[in-house]
Amino acid sequence: MLHKYAVLLRMKWVEMFEYRLASLVWVFGAMTQPLITMLVWMNIDREASATFILYFASLIVVERLTTAWDVWELDREIREGSFSYYIVRPFAHVHWAIAENLVYKLVFFVILAPVWLVAAIFVPALRLKLDWGQLALFVFALLIASAIRFLFSYSFGLLGFWVTKVTAIYGMLEAISLFFSGRIAPLSFLPPVIQQLSFYLPFRYMVGFPVELLTGDVHGTAGDGFLLAIFWMLCFLALTFALWKRGLKKNQAVGG
Amino acid sequence: MSIHVQHLQKNFQVHVRNAGWIDALRSLFHREYRTVEAVKDISFQIESGEIVGFLGPNGAGKTTTIKMLAGLLYPTAGQILVEGFVPFEQKVEFKKMMSLVMGQKSQLIWDIPPMETFLVNKAVYEIEERAFQRTLEELVELLELQPLLGKPTRSLSLGQRMKCELAATLLHQPKVLFLDEPTIGLDVHTQEKVRQFIAKYNREHNTTILLTSHYMGDVTALCQRVMIINHGQLLYDGDLQILSEKLTPYKLIEVRLPEVPSVSWEKYGELVGVDEGKVSLRVARERVTDVSARLLHDFSVADLNIQDPPMEEVITLAFQEEVHAS
Amino acid sequence: MRRNLRIFREFFRTCLVEELEYRSEFLGNLLSSLFGIAIAILTIQIFFFQTDQLGGWPYADVLVLLGIFNTLQGLIDFALKPNMSRLLQNIRKGTLDYVLTKPVDSMFFVSFRHLVFWRLVDVLLGLGLVAYGLWVKRYVPTLSDLLIFLVTLFASLVLIYALWMLLMTTAFWVIKIDDLSFVFNSFFETTRFPIGTYRGWLRIVLTYVLPAALITSTPASALLGNWSVGATLITVVVAGIFLWLSRLFWRYALRSYTSASS
């Protein structure tokens, strides 16, 4: 198992450097929207500028380190039929996906960490005031967040066995999650209804919660946050398993 | 016994799509389905080490059958055993002893060299280092892969890619190999190479091979035994030569003459064509020797050539006549 | 020019026929467009939950601006974006030669060959939002407001086209990147909010170097009755200059392309 993973990781690594390196430009492309949102907030509340800079910088980093595009990959593989090649081989498809996610997230981290460190020299707002315990909590929340997002994306991709327009629906959910995940603003700046909803919906635990831990401004208690985060992770884990089993059955019934 | 198939049947539910605006709207809420019987009732057995050609026009049910044999689809009814496994259970042991090549789809990783795919398969199939090296060496030599191993897959030609595809599927030395249109889109020269390789590999490893193709050349070059399928039913299962004799009970005799005399050729056989210095006749199989002797006696023949009717013709006839399995 | 219009009409027709083939997709696309604009309005609502102005613009004015943004975005997705991937492919595979041998203006041809009609829904929705913003403000534009609005909107379109082509033309040199449109999108996103939202050097760049400030803010101001002849003239002149620059750049790129491939 470990050996298989090592080989897959190496392959994904080589693959990325061979061609997909160009797609890393997206790291920077994906920054525009949060940066503009940050500027808008800084315009609304000038005194709190430093808070917004830290919040949105953290958001960009967490966003990149948790992002998963498995729904698009699965959609393509199921549509083109190359998914069959994963079924006839004795190693489940999900491992390929996990390996890919690990590699890309590592690369994003390697790019973004130094950028942050250099930026912190010039922008005092970016200097973190966390002790090791808080940092550990952040890393833990980040891991859960990327697990939730991966499982969310992957289980949605599995829906492709039944529905043809999965990516479109997923895109809509991503857009809705703008408001609940903390991407549009720190939770405390949102209307009370949205704040309450965000607390219970899964989206905050995909992005917003780790960001709050990193900026040191947790909404509610961290304990509650972790409970809900783990709850959602287990939900999506169960969902992924269920969909995988049924999806394979469905695929065997109608062909791929 | 390598493959055992009994009363195999597969139905699909197909979504009926209509063209109009209103129908498009309606289909969002209510979908109409129609049942398509892709495979109606098929039974056959394949011995270990046999190469069997699976022939049929598009949509005949070839690919559906192959997919059921490989475990990608489960049958609506009937039984399949491949090397003692029930394919659709998708047991790891089953996956490790079979392989599937689909001519129109690729398992090679697009952006990186084929060697990377080989290494991934080595890990995934848990192939031992020694066995891997040995098999790889053999495949590289047989398929002349050496110059291709280090190039990104996307820069390979279709033919080169198919060779690598074959290598990737054979690394774990499967006992059973399913080839679905392996030569599709390849040029004549590469088709020939791939055929030679498959024949040689089968001889040396005694691999059971089931091959679908709509190129007659693949089948005539590789398979003694063919199964002809159309509309989800097996029309013929048996020797290719016998089929040919049965369906086309004649041969073609071509006579070259210094000059073509104007005689009534009908007494020798059915006239197919007269060219400058060349006459083609269609003659019943049992009269071939007789007619040739007479031709040689009656005219000053420069050259005489006896041919079997082209295989395409045989198969077209087979599809039309719906001859049942003998 | 007349001939170009005729050719454009032909492009229009063939693409429309193509699209009618996929009419079952229409409803889904319509839904996603409606959804998109709803999200954009909600975003504005979130900001106005904390403030009563954005960059000096009150709520209703920002709605008008957002409407114009949506309209322009729809036009980009309708006519410009569908052509980009093909242009990149043409350059990469050398099939641009076919285009160059055709008796049409090459820049015109590569930028308008393919159209995606359902995106015009976004244009309609955008105009609807503009109307709604005006209604919220209870402002009825005068005839001169409308006239100046149309002039500045046209100038914005020319400006967008010029900036777009400037970026696409770099594809002659930067061929490794699959998708250049996100660079443009990043820039275009800044026009979603009034220019007053930005401060410092960013504002200077977006006003004088990459004139994002002109693209949505000028037509929106015009429609709201805050226009001046001077600002309108500047917009038109700037658009003209950028169009001229983009043509110059395109010709330069073609020269180096043809001399390199022969």
Image (cartoon, rainbow, N blue to C red):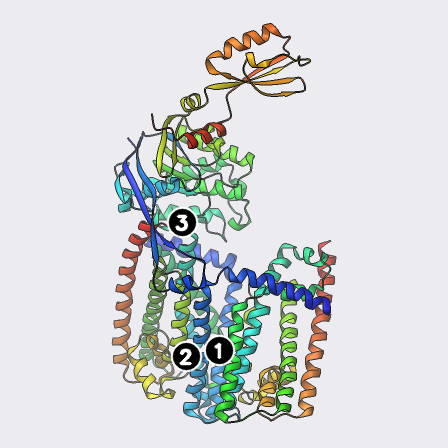
Amino acid type assigned to the residue bearing label 2 in the image: Arg
Relative to C199, residue C244 above or below: above
Location of residue B120 in the rendering, given as x and y in whole percent from the top left corner: 40, 49
Q: Is residue A127 visible?
A: no
Residues under labels 3 and 1: Cα distance? 38 Å
Q: Which residue is mark 3?
A: B120
**Helix, strand or loop for disc 2:** loop
**Helix, strand or loop for disc 1:** helix
Q: Which residue is mark 2?
A: A183
The 10 Å Cα crowd at callout 2, few under 14, some 14 to 19, many 20 or more, is many
Relative to C137, residue A88 above or below: above
Would you say the residues marked 2 and 1 are in contact, meaning their CB atoms lie under 8 Å apart? yes
Q: Both on one chain, marks 2 and 1? A: yes
Of residue A53 and residue C223, the one placed in the foreground of this image is C223
| Quarter-of-image position of residue B133 | top left
Residues under labels 2 and 3: Cα distance? 38 Å
Residue A33: give its label: 1
**Helix, strand or loop for disc 3:** helix
Q: Is residue B213 visible?
A: yes
Q: In the image, is C193 to the left or to the right of B68? A: right
Q: Mark 1 falls within which chain?
A: A
| Quarter-of-image position of residue C177 | bottom right
Residues under labels 2 and 1: Cα distance? 9 Å
Location of residue B80 in the rendering, given as x and y in whole percent from the top left corner: 27, 38
Amino acid type assigned to the residue bearing label 3 in the image: Val
Of residue A225 and residue B297, the one placed in the foreground of this image is B297
Q: Mark 2 falls within which chain?
A: A
Would you say the residues marked 2 and 3 are in contact, meaning their CB atoms lie under 8 Å apart? no
Of residue C31 and residue C82, the one placed in the foreground of this image is C31
Q: Both on one chain, marks 2 and 3? A: no
